[in-house]
Amino acid sequence: MHQTTLLSIQSARILHGGIQQFSDLNFSWKKGEHWAIVGNSGKELSAFLETLRGHTIVSAGKISRPFSWEYSQQKHNDGQVHSFRDLIAYVSQKYELKNRSNQQNFYFQQRFNSSESEQTLTVKECLKQVEPKIQGPWTVENASRALNLNGLLDQSLLKLSNGETRRLVLAMGLMRQPRLYLMDQPLTGLDVKTRAAFGKTLQAMIQSGIHVLLTTSPGEIPDGITHVAQLNASGIIQTWPRESFPHKDLQQTKLAWDWNLLKALLPTPAPSDEMVVDLQDVNIRYGEKQILKNLNWQIRSGEQWLLKGPNGAGKSTLISLLIGENPQAYSQKIFLFGRKRGSGESIWDVKRPLGFVAPELPRYFSANQTCRKVILSGFFDTMGLFKKTTAEQEEFADQWLRLFDLEPVKDLLIQRLSLAQQRWTLLARALIKHPKILILDEAAQGLDDLQRALFRETIQKVCEFCPITLIYVSHYAEDVPEGVTKVFELG
Ligand SMILES: Nc1ncnc2c1ncn2[C@@H]1O[C@H](COP(=O)(O)OP(=O)(O)OP(=O)(O)O)[C@@H](O)[C@H]1O
């Protein structure tokens, strides 16, 4: 094999999670090449990365990893345990950050309860904790500079926004001093400006000697990438040098649900122009940091809003006020359906008219919650099913399972589902109780292009079929359903 090859896959049949993932995978990664992998299926893209890092089974064909030969030889000579994995950093879609006692036991509201944050590490502690197997140029200082974390070093992990967390996880990968850096959809969750600057971040990594391979959508190939490959169920079907990559949409198929069934599952209340949300002069601060300042926002029934703003602008904080997860709500002038928050209503009164989806929710359901139970829990506004359900409720849940093609996985634990299946489960959970307001906080985040398009169309149809009020948070203009014409911008 030629010396410049870092990694080579030849006619490989790959098994992942007990099933065949690729029938004939071929790939050659040479020195100086930095790859973007695109494809229609998030599952296949993740399985490809898992294959590169040696976490799948090769039942036929061959994978060789010359990038690690010298290191292995050296370690072998020194009589030390070693693996090619020592030289790889990997950022997955399902990353989890742990608290001080190394347990993942945050609960959802904890984030907005600043007094509980002593249980978690700070950003700096978290970066320092990474123990690389090899030496390299990355320090807490330059890694946090590359990912724009300087202002957050002393912040508890718990308090980080979505995009801030994503940047931290990317910086932790650098602290492993990798030779190869594999990233699964690293741009998701990052705001427009950070995404635009991501090419610079990649170039800093590349200049330090790292070889980069990431999955992304065809319309978003960051600077620094030199080659693009398209993946499908058989394997890599085409490769291009970056400059000749056709920037056209590679999407050929379009997915759809049974829209008649969706319509039948939604309520048909008479339209009204009732004021459903009224925020007057809202101010939220954490210690010294003012997150929301003199904020006023009025939403009438049936209006569809986009809530936007850069990472850390306060979008999730604002939503936590609406959904009753933030104790600071009680001291503010927040009216829902004309009733002031903190005027004696129970948390269930607050939650009943609201449907809410956020990508991180599956983490907070208790360990025994299956897809079907999670959907049914929507009737009770609990993070899991703890009550007896009626035959009618179960029939509804079964119809939602059918609609979103979740029947084959209905008895799997929510955490075991694919990202897309999790999202459909959460959407069914939010809609099953016929909410008056649907709140989607970056709900299409991390989905592949086909699923993103389907999610957008599904929300568009929901709005067409019933006069629901929508608050839609997204960093991507192309994810926003066309009916969403009103914009509320923070930051
Ligand atoms: N309990 C807390 N104590 C201190 N700061 C906090 C706390 N909770 C959130 N913050 C900070 O408040 C800011 C707003 O966070 P929020 O999650 O609302 O942002 P966001 O607009 O939703 O961001 P993203 O686009 O990344 O999801 C962030 O900078 C975050 O670090």
Image (spheres, rainbow, N blue to C red):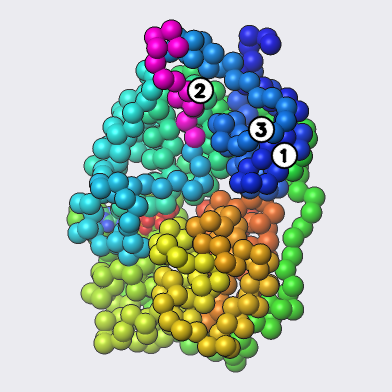
Q: Which residues are magenta?
A: 76-90
User: What residue do we see at 60% from left, 25% from top?
Assistant: 34
Q: Which residue is mark 3?
A: 58
Q: Which residue is mark 1?
A: 22
Q: Is residue 84 magenta?
A: yes
User: What residue do we see at 63% from left, 35% from top?
Assistant: 57
Compared across the picture, whether 67 is left or right of 458 comes to left
| Circle 1: residue type | Phe
Asked whether the residues under the numbered discs 3 and 2 touch, taking CB atoms below 8 Å apart as contact, a structural biologist would say: no
Q: Which mark is residue 84?
A: 2
Q: Is residue 47 above or below residue 399?
A: above
Quarter containing ligand 1? bottom left
In three-dimensional space, the C-alpha distance between marks 3 and 1, rounded to whole angstroms, equals 10 Å
Q: Earlier in the sequence, mark 2 or mark 1?
A: 1
Q: Is residue 207 above or below residue 41?
A: above
Q: Is residue 73 above or below residue 490?
A: above
Of the pair 89 and 412, the residue shown nearer to us: 412
| Circle 3: residue type | Val
User: What residue do we see at 56% from left, 17% from top?
Assistant: 67
Q: Is residue 41 magenta?
A: no
Look at the numbered disc 1 and give the secondary structure of its residue: strand
Mark 2 crowdedness (10 Å alpha carbons): few <14, some 14-19, many ≥20: some
Beta carbon at label 3 within 8 Å of ligand 1: no
Q: Position of residue 480 (x, y in %)?
A: 60, 61
Name the quadrant containing residue 268.
Answer: bottom right
